[in-house]
Image (cartoon, grey):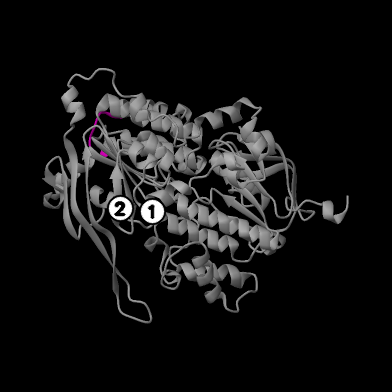
Amino acid sequence: MTEVDVPLLAIRDLTVAFRTRDREVTAVRGVSLEIQAGQTVAVVGESGSGKSTTAAAINRLLPGNGRIVSGEVLFEGRDLAQASERELTAIRGAGIGLVPQDPMSNLNPLMRIGEQIAEALVVHGQSTGARAKAIELLEQVGIPEPERRAAQYPHEFSGGMRQRALIAMGLACRPKLLIADEPTSALDVTVQRRILDQLEQLTAEMGTAILLITHDLALAAERADTILVMYRGEIVEAGPAAEIIARPQHEYTQRLLRAAPSLTTVSMVTKLAPADAANPAEVANPTDLVRIEDLRKVFTLRASKSGAASEFTAVDGVSLTIPRGQTVSIVGESGSGKSTTANLLLGLEDITSGHILFDGTDLTSLSRRDLFAFRRRVQPVFQNPYAALDPRYTVEQSIAEPLRVHRVGTKATRTKTVAELLDKVSLPSELADRLPHELSGGQRQRVAIARALALSPELVVLDEAVSALDVLVQAQILELLAELQRELGLSYLFISHDLAVVRMISHTVHVMQTGRIVEGGRPDDLFTNPQNPYTRELLAAIPNPSGV
């Protein structure tokens, strides 16, 4: 084999295992793959299939209880499975870039964003002009006002903006291989397209190869040259992207394709609507559980070195209603104000002006005791499954905590309720005594959803609640949410950047841009005949697998 024929990355018969309290569990079994310079290879599969573990094994960033049992990881012919820590330090970042999945635990909360990106350059001897380069990278990944944003801390960024900062760090040293582990799962479709276009441009300019880890089969089909499908730690199907999409051979791949939502998928609102209503007039004209009137939220930004403090209007005159038993969704790009609106409804942020009425009561008038009772009736599921759970609590303790805090049931009945909730979110009962670090990202999010449902609330605020889930589990969770709504009369405020998912589950959709609602209505009307240019831009940016 000539030097030209040597793949940039070649994994040979890789097996990875994790030590648990009483045994060792094999997470990846006999995986082999190759990536040539300039090639994009996507690994898709459900949460816990081993795709992220495979990626972490490449540059030996496995958790402390994980180890490579056997196999080779050849990067430019060098076996990283046998490399010293010093050799790996030189390769990480410069030779192999990484965009990890969790933006919160991978950004230092005590360092400014610009400093963290510049640090990646300085470590590899690129200290000259590192700050200017960091600002340029932030601009490339679509962060507005990059110079001002570079001086901010991670907590001052939205979830999507934090993810973009990680992408900037991964690209900083222009590596030969970029491992992108769910790099756009937190991003709206317009920014997702911009980021992936940037990655493709880098590939063309530098010959950089990309290993894309994703649960989004449509995204993989649109962007990758080759798709590898993983299931229970093994690669069950591999081939050119167009061929995998057009003629999937393995039953699991076929299931993934069937479960992937699109704008033509039958709406669950329609599919699960009751055939005969006890009170048709009430169904046709439901009462409003939530009424939001002219809501505004203004944040005071810290003074920069060059000027005084300034103000930023995150929510600007938002008005909407959430009828009982219905799902109202808000879509828009990261930083549009949709999550801030959700936090105001949850009482996690103070309202600058306007009103939020819940069941006729203005939230600003609630006493501390009333607020405690209100929070039993309204439960959140946040975007980040890693930060949502206390790392010291077992799964059972996390789900049971709301029941215990609100003094619902006995210890025995709470244990039974936890088991029922785990079953509802498609998690096995044996996970009850696991800690969060022993779960995959998708499993953690399902625990967070089970926790939110524990108190049987009237309103659930779901902030990107299914963005971390593979399509099979996502379909199960959406079906579950729709069924619970039908059975219990639940209302949902559903925050998402995934328009296909929004169409499936929503009765009403509002499109937000720069703090304002620019368009709203029934999903079928909104997505088939959008009136606002921004809505049309969102729809045009949805990945198109048939275009490969």
Q: Mark 2 points at which residue?
A: 518
Q: In this view, does 275 lie above or below 34?
A: above
Looking at this view, name the residue that lies furthest to the right.
Answer: 1
Quarter of the figure with residue 353: bottom left
Q: Where is residue 389 in the image (x, y as percent from the top left)?
A: 40, 45
Which of pointers 2 and 1 lies earlier in the amino acid sequence?
2
Residue 397 visible? The answer is no
Q: Is the magenta stretch mostly helix, strand or loop?
A: loop
Indicate left or right for 545 with 76 as reference: left
Choose between 256 and 221: the one closer to the eye: 221
Q: What residue type is labelled 1?
A: Tyr
Give the residues drawn in magenta, as a range: 405-411
**How far apart are the two marked residues, 2 and 1, measured between alpha carbons?**
8 Å
Count of numbered circles in the view: 2
Task: Assign a secondary structure to mark 2.
Answer: strand
Question: Could you say which is closer to the camera, residue 536 or residue 222?
Answer: 536
| Residue at x-position 29% and y-position 73% | 310
User: Could you tell me if the residues under marks 2 and 1 are in contact, i.e. CB atoms within 8 Å?
Assistant: yes
As drawn, 179 above or below 478: below
Would residue 408 be counted in the magenta stretch? yes
382 over 109 or under it: above or below? above
For residue 534, the mark is 1
Q: Which residue lies furthest to the bottom in this view?
A: 306
Q: Position of residue 147 (x, y in %)?
A: 44, 73
Comparing 408 with 112, the one in front is 112
Q: How crowded is mark 1: few (under 14 residues within 10 Å), some or many (20 or more)?
A: some
Q: What residue type is labelled 2?
A: Val
Can residue 431 be seen here? The reply is yes
Instruction: Judge from the rendering whether residue 306 lies leftward or rightward of residue 357; answer left or right.
Output: right
